[in-house]
Amino acid sequence: MPRRVTILTSDSSPRDGLERAVANFLDRGRARNLSPSTLRFYRTRLTAFARYLKQAEVTPDPATITPAIVRDFVAAERERVSAVTAQHSFVALRAFFKFLTREEAIAVNPMDRVEKVRVPRKVIQTLSASQVEALLGVCRRGFTGARLRAIILVLLDTGLRVSELCGINLEDVSWDEGTLRVMGKGSKERVVPFGEAARQALIGYLAKRGKLAGQSAVFVTCYRDRLNRHEVHRILQNAGRRAGLSGVRCSPHTFRHTCAVMYLRNGGDAFTLQKLLGHATLDMTRRYCELSQTDALAKHRQASPGDRFLGLPGPDGRRTRLT
């Protein structure tokens, strides 16, 4: 029998009930060892929901929330911010009310009758080989240049998320096997291989980094602190500007996309790519497959072996009838 969560008491208001329900939900997330960023995501979206209820003058009682109220909130989010944020709100509320239903805090889950938010499918942006070369060309000498080169080649070769890159410690690098041990989403550990170019870049960078007392992070700032995701974004954006990559979003996730597409173009298979990237399903990997296939079609149009014979006459130079 699951533990029952008491949402309302005789001396509590409906708002107290919602706040207590959210607190119970987040406590359960901590017990499940969800990452701080995931907990922050849930807290932010549920706070936005509570704010909407107050503005709409809706009683903030989880037991009386209807599908119509949730739909109105999601629609308001879509108008106020974006379809992506509205989808995030839908995901957070679905997890929240599923928890309350399982804990028998509410009798009916309103999310069972709320439709998913349709999000426009954007084109995945990747870097070309020449653009990667341009980025490597702006890696200066010294510590920051060696660090930039290592970041570029490790991201390109492994497809790591920026949080995974920042979390790598010295003991996570296996030089003999050529692998990195990283902690992915949902606190799932995986081992990711890297190639010779990334290996040489890491060796060159670590030689500049040197031994730092009490610091196990591979990637550090000039002041010996562990790099965070915002600093990596800034480093790559500055490199993109110096390399003259106008109109290109030079971000860690762009490198992740580029890694996936280049891997498939070079003959890699989708199932191995899914494992390397740490995807729970093949959904995103399929999008990479579609993109790599589109690229192959474009390349074929440019270098079609058969198209060189267009316009040539028949064997006798005349039109012939079918026989």
Image (cartoon, rainbow, N blue to C red):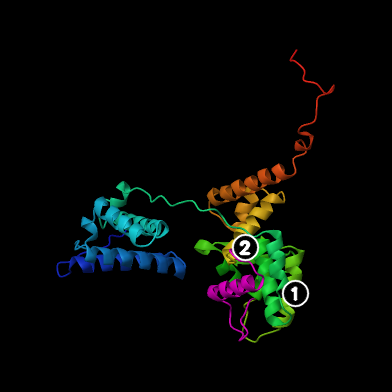
Q: Mark on residue 255?
A: 2
* 2 or 1: tag closer to the N-terminus: 1
In the image, residue 165 lies at what x, y percent? Answer: 60, 69
Residue 129 position by quadrant: bottom right
* Horizontal arrangement in the rendering, residue 10 relative to residue 228 (left or right): left
Residue found at the far right of this picture: 316
Residue 202 position by quadrant: bottom right
In the image, residue 259 lies at what x, y percent? Answer: 65, 58
SS label for mark 1: helix
CB-based contact (under 8 Å), mark 2 and mark 1: no
- Asked if residue 117 lies in the magenta stretch, the reply is no
Residue 213 position by quadrant: bottom right
The residue sitting at 58% across, 77% down in the picture is: 227
Image quadrant holding the N terminus, namely: bottom left
- Camera-nearest residue between 52 and 134: 134
Q: The magenta stretch spans which residues? A: 219-248
- Asked if residue 244 lies in the magenta stretch, the reply is yes
User: Can see residue 107?
Assistant: no
- The three-letter code of the residue at mark 1 reads Ile
Residue found at the far front of this picture: 318
Q: Mark on residue 149?
A: none
Q: Which residue corresponds to mark 1?
A: 203
